[in-house]
Image (spheres, rainbow, N blue to C red):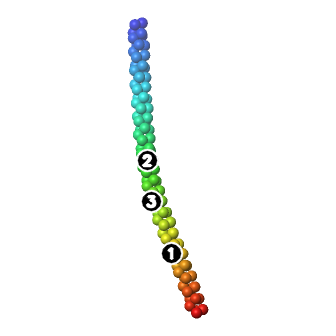
């Protein structure tokens, strides 16, 4: 009878030790997975920050181009106005010269 009790106790101990090893392995796998996810989250955050910074830089460049184009177009329009005024003045002077 003692032999049977010892065998049952040994089996129970082996099962418990086996379960503990499995639980430890499961916990280690879970922890490694969580760590990998955290690392990936950090990488995603870093990439998003870089992309945002690049977008901001691109926006600044685009804004500068728009301002430069606006300034250029305004200068061209001002020159066109002066040309129109000069042509009108020349035409008036020609009419005045012809009438004298």
Residue located beneath label 2 in the image: 49
Q: Residues within 10 Å of mark 1 (few under 14, many from 20)?
A: few
Q: In the figure, 1 relative to 46: above or below?
A: above
Give me the residue at 43% from left, 53% from top: 54
Q: CA distance from mark 1 to mark 2?
A: 45 Å
Q: Nearer the viewer, residue 53 or 38?
A: 53
First in sequence: mark 1 vs mark 2: 2
Q: CA distance from mark 3 to mark 2?
A: 18 Å
Evaluate whether residue 40 shows in this view. Answer: no
Q: CA distance from mark 3 to mark 1?
A: 27 Å
Evaluate whether residue 68 shows in this view. Answer: yes
Residue located beneath label 3 in the image: 61
Q: Nearer the viewer, residue 97 or 53?
A: 97
**Percent of width and height locating residue 90:** 54, 85
Residue 79's mark? 1
Would you say 91 lies left or right of 29 here? right
């Amino acid at each position: 009878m003692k032999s049977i009790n010892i065998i049952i106790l040994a089996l129970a101990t082996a099962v418990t030790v086996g379960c503990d090893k499995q639980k430890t392995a499961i916990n280690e796998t879970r922890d490694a997975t969580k760590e990998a996810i955290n690392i990936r989250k950090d990488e995603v955050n870093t990439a998003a920050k870089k992309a945002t910074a690049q977008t901001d830089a691109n926006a600044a460049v685009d804004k500068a181009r728009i301002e430069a184009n606006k300034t250029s177009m305004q200068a061209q329009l001002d020159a066109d106005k002066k040309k129109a005024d000069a042509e009108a003045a020349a035409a008036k002077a020609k009419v005045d010269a012809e009438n004298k």
